[in-house]
Image (spheres, coloured by chain):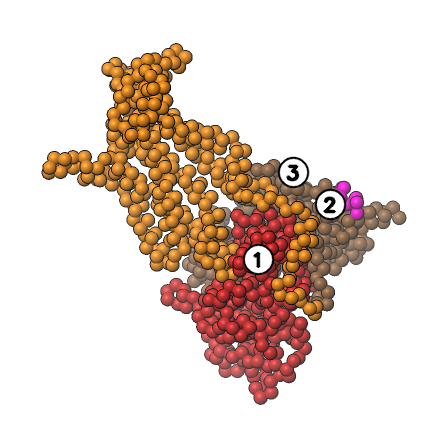
Chain colours: A orange, B brown, C red
Amino acid sequence: MSTSPRKGEWFSDATFERVAAQFAVEQVPNLWADVRRRLAARASARWSLRWLLALVLASLIVPLLPLPSPAAMALDKQPKPPVAPWVEPFNERFEPYYGELNPLDRALVSVRQRAFGEKQTGPWLGTDAKGRDTLARILWGSRTSLLVALFAALTSLTIGVAWGAIAGLARSRVDNAMMRTVDVLQSLPTIFLVIFLLSFLNAPSPTGAARSVSRETVFFLVIGAVSWLPMARVVRGQVLALRSAAFVESARTQGASTGWIVRAHLVPNVLPIVLVYLTLTLPSVILYEAFLSFLGLGVEAPNVSWGVLAADGAEAISPLATFWWLPLGPALAMGATLLALGLLGDALRDALDVKRSEA
Amino acid sequence: MSLLEVRNLRVSFATPRGSVQAVESFGVSIDAGETIALVGESGSGKSVSALALARLLPTPPARIETGEVLFEGRDLLLLGERELQRVRGKELGFVFQDPTSSLHPLMTIGEQLEEALLVHERLPRTSARQRAEWALAEVGIAEPKARLTAFPHQLSGGMRQRVMIAMALLTRPKLLIADEPTTALDVTVQASLFALLRKVQREHGTALLLITHDLALVSTFARRTLVMYAGAVVESGLTSELVARPAHPYTRALLRSVPSLSTSLDHALPVIPGTPPDPAHPALGCAFAPRCEFALTACHQRRPALVALSTSASGAAGVRVYNRRVACTESERALAAEVSS
Amino acid sequence: MSALLAVEGLCVRFAAREGRMVHAVEGVSFSIPSGGALGLVGESGSGKSTTARAIAGLQAPSEGRVLLDGEPFGRQSARSARARVQLVFQDAQGSLDPRRPVGWSVEEPLALQGSGTAKTRRARAFAALDACGLDPKLSLRYPHELSGGQRQRVAIARALVCEPQLVILDEPTSALDVSVRAQIVNLLCDLRQRFGLAYLFVSHDLAVVRRVCEEVAVMYLGRIVERAPRSELFASPRHPYTQALLAAVPEIGRDLALAPLALDPASPLAPPSGCAFHPRCPRRSEVPAQRCSLELPILQTHGDAALSCHLAAGAVPRAHPAAPGSGASRG
């Protein structure tokens, strides 16, 4: 038998020089660069991202835009149909009535007043029965939907992912306790919970001071309690499967710590699924908000949301007159947003699947 | 007339990156009661061919481009869905590699066995149960009556495969197609299942198409063998001749590279270099040429056809002529030389 | 002679349903000298893989101990000790992280050791891939982009990169195509020669074990029933189970269907009494007084070989153990 090479010299640097000389070290593939490239290659993903980014931007700077105030009423007693932008691009009837605003928005509104003065867009999407501009209300209302989505995304990503990961990594007893908690929360009938909480918290106190808790707070509490549950389940399932995967076991035989396993193996393998799942959670939360608001359990006047607008629009439909523009605007805005999220999730799933990438 | 005659079967799969030719040309003829082995590595198209001839491939993505599958004279590829169901249910039996996924996990063995009889033979329930019990006894399952009420997960892997064989044989099919029936099982169980297959074949005169990756396994079991590589049959003939005097370089190399209990340990195992070809990137010439030690320039340029070897090369004359066929440029050349001389 | 790896009385038991215990591994002892190769063969449920996993530290033994160079080896061992034992799995696809280029996976053991700089780690990973017959360019590919044989080569390179003394191979060739299997078998033989590795080779494929290992231990339902040098075991197997196993190996021109065992293997959940093999044993009638079904045979050592069978205990008088050193060639 030939003498074996000495320890530490099986694969010497000399071998490396020889091997490295055979080819130039190419760029090490970067998963995220690949994902960006593949996303960009897909038209539906590009348009979805553009729509979502435009919507986020618009909702952020909506006080700056030369729009009518969403709360300013005109006593027309009759919804006005849309007027095409080229017929009446702008008018000078701006009324700075916004109801309560936070300081930042107030500042933005004053900037808007200085920049545009009395100028505001015409009723491009019509007005409602109280003369409020539909376009302005849709854009202001998008803030509610996006805020709900953002809140749900944050709870999913923090509580949901952490809860699932810990349950998946923990011993069976801890895992059991954590997942039964999820089961219990999941089994809560959320609609009744919202109604119950609202009536309970808003019951007039003996001193006569009502409205101790706003509807928005209740609403966010409930969303926060339930929106992370599916994510926790998904993450736990993934972590459980990965924990016994041969490559994780193989690292363990080398003395890899749990920290290493999480950083080196779990995060890269779980993150894509988390992202894709997020694009499934967000539409459902946006819809849920709209649904509750439609029932009158969500945001309340003078705040607006797409659900409130849809409810107003539905009310406005009568046998005598169909004010079609009232439900159509918010419905289109919400439909486009949900579609964009769905398409984006689809594209993300494909882009993150390394097996689908071309070699 | 042979029981099954398959001619020029071509199967492709639609993939996101275009159509992939899974089977390029497949043909076989099986006589009643005969055992034929279909040998090849994964991706050689052996399973796809067998599934395609019974029209068991989902279409799409699969597409049978050309071919004839004459079963007792009827072309299965032209049959209507109802007739096809009848042929598949009664005349053909199937045994697959993984019995776990072929058995319904929530139905007892008895219910699953009876179902076939109730559907295809329209037997009354009591006699169906009787037949199911006989079928289990026949495949060597002890206490068949008790086993009828067992669920698949309560049986061992070998036992489940016996149940699959019993199920395949229930309607007394004329042809049994077994796709790697023992690959997932231990060697001792494999041996007893082969003994079982031989016994039922002898008793019922069932023809058997046995699909496997292991030439040694079928060397004494199958009368004839077809060797597939990259979607095409590269060699066929009587098994005894094929293993004794392999004509195609692939068959030859395959036989040598299998570790056996009798080869000398003084030398390293002869290997076939490289890996089987990717069906998505088919070669222009002979698919085996890149790995073939005898490859000539011509091999890379033109695909050799499956041609009959002359009788002198294919063994003793007077035996019923099951032509030794081989698809190799080298053989074509030898053959041409023989004819011209 | 001090062994590199010594396994003493290893037991692994799992809790099964209904409060039953599965004795997956019962009292397994063997040793592997430095540079030696032991094949552990048996059917599914024989406990051979569980034994390998217990030695690698993936499964806590219920009893017994594992010694590496005389030192206890297990989950608590330092990383430097763990690096001396490496594991190669059957499923190369599963043993490589699907979201990491394979080069990263080869480097991972080095990174865990904290040895060298990023550049020297890469250098050694490249060289290890090269030694396993792979173009180091492939280190940039993802596992799914490689063929089964290439993935198994990567897994072997990953095991070698830390310069181990012992490699535990769990069915390393079972998932491979016939034409690729021979390549990997030859590679394993070459690497052992080149680096003086010791192997614990777990496989159900006796022909492959015969190629790679000088010594073979046969397991049945958690116990070693026969252990012998390669030359003895394959030429003259003594345990009826070994004989049945060898007779069932598919060989060109051998009729497999001729001598099947009467029954399928028993479940490890309900092992038979006495000798676990007795219900299937074709030769139990040669032992008088139902001894096989009543009494558990003990593993008796005869020189290089060991056997646990009542048949042999009767045939070989205890006072005269077989002559030692019969044809065992190590190295």
Identify the residue at horizontal 38%, vertical 49% (top origin). Answer: A162
Q: Nearer the viewer, residue C92 or A6?
A: A6
Discs 2 and 1 share one subunit: no
**Chain containing the residue with disc 1:** C
- Magenta: main secondary structure: helix
Discs 3 and 1 share one subunit: no
Looking at the figure, which quarter contains the C terminus of chain A? top right
Residue B298 belongs to the span the image colors magenta: yes
Give amino acid for label 1: Gly
Discs 2 and 3 share one subunit: yes
Residue pointed to by mark 2: B286
* Spatial separation of the CA atoms under disc 2 and disc 3: 21 Å
- Residue C206, by quadrant, is bottom right
Give amino acid for label 3: Thr
**Residue B304: percent from the left, percent from the top?**
75, 44
**Chain containing the residue with disc 3:** B
What number is the disc on residue B7?
Answer: none
- At mark 3, the secondary structure is strand
Q: Nearer the viewer, residue B30 or B105?
A: B105
Residue pointed to by mark 1: C116
| Residue B123 seen anywhere in this rendered image of the structure | no
Q: Residues within 10 Å of mark 1 (few under 14, many from 20)?
A: few
Identify the residue at horizontal 35%, vertical 29% (top origin). Answer: A142
Residue pointed to by mark 3: B66
The residue most toward the bottom is C319
Looking at the figure, which quarter contains the N terminus of chain A? bottom right
Q: Nearer the viewer, residue C256 or A120?
A: A120
- Write down the region rendered in magenta: B296-302
Give amino acid for label 2: Cys
Identify the residue at horizontal 27%, vertical 28% (top origin). Answer: A101
